[in-house]
Each structure stands twice: as C-alpha cells, then as structure tokens.
Amino acid sequence: MNSIILDHNAIEHKIRRIAFQIYESNVNESKVIIAGIDSNGYLLAEKLRDTLKHISDIEPILCKVTVNKQKPWQPISTCLTPEEYTNASIVLVDDVLNSGTTLIYGVKHFLNVPLKQFKTAVLVNRNHKKYPVKADFKGISLSTSLQEHVSVNFSENNYSVVLE
C-alpha cells in the first residue's frame, strides 16, 4: 500500500523553507552554488535556485552532479569545473537521504578543492545512514523500515513524496 507523505503544496512549502535556510547561511555571499545530484536531486536544486532568486539578491549557480548510484566510487562529473567552485559556498542537493552513500561520494568529490562553505540539503531524510553524513537542510525526517521505499515525483504541478 502506498502512502502519500508530502503532497504538492507541502513540497513547495518545504522547498521555500530550505531556500530561506540556504539564504540565511549565505547571507554575506554574492553567489552560492546549488549542486544537484542527477536526476531528482538536480530537479530539486532547480526549484531551490528559482526560489532563491525570488527571496534574495544572492546569485544561485546551478550545477549538475552525475553519480553512478550503483557504483558511486567511480568518477563523478559536474557541469562546472573545479576552478568555478574553488573558494565558493556550495550546497549539495539530493531528493532522499537513505544510506548516505550517494551524498558522501558527492561530498568527497567537492573536497578536492578549497571551499568557503559546504552544506547539504535533502527533501526527505530517511535515517538509515551507513556513512557519517548528515543533511544540513531537510524538508522532512522520516523513520521507515529498510523494506520500505520512498519515491519523489516532480511531475509538472503535481509533486509528491510516496512511501511504498
């Protein structure tokens, strides 16, 4: 049986709240890099960027992060060069933090250059971590069993988070 955890309006509210948290932690910055893990993390990053544009004068720069989720130790690619994010403030974004595997390898990739600040943001934090990684900004914390699956849907004007 599927249960809707967050509907469209609730997700929009969570995105707005996370965007304000990102703004508050970067209030003295002129720009912030919103690095979204492909594919749903990137969609969430786009929505955070759009909201940041409306609520602040910070320039949010979008960056797509491609991670092989089956083999996350393989090389990670980004649409920005390391020179473009050196000494920058970065927020790494994913839709769901489950075991932390994808997020920790994403964090590791960005730590190869000096950064001004590094934060993480997720829409759903499932609390099943294998790695010491946490979400600095999260929409909702959800205690689930390992057998359950959380899916995030960003269909046009019908967002949802479903527990399957």
Image (tube, rainbow, N blue to C red):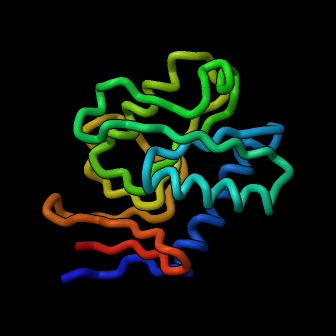
Which residue is more in the foreground, 141 or 29? 29
Residue at point 43%, 25% (across, down):
108
Q: Residue furthest left?
A: 147
Q: Is residue 139 left or right of residue 98?
A: right
Residue at point 51%, 51% (across, down):
42
- Residue 164, compared with residue 32, is above or below; it is below
Among the 4 quarters of the image, the one containing residue 32: top right
User: Residue 146 appears at what percent x and percent y?
Assistant: 16, 58
- Residue 104, compared with residue 15, is above or below; it is above
Quadrant in which the N terminus appears: bottom left
Residue at point 47%, 73% (across, down):
155
The number of numbered discs placed on residues in the rendered structure image is 0
User: Residue 112 appears at what percent x and percent y?
Assistant: 51, 16
Q: Is residue 163 left or right of residue 88?
A: left
User: Residue 7 appears at what percent x and percent y?
Assistant: 46, 81
Q: Residue furthest right?
A: 57
Which residue is more in the foreground, 84 or 145? 84
Which residue is more in the foreground, 38 or 93? 38
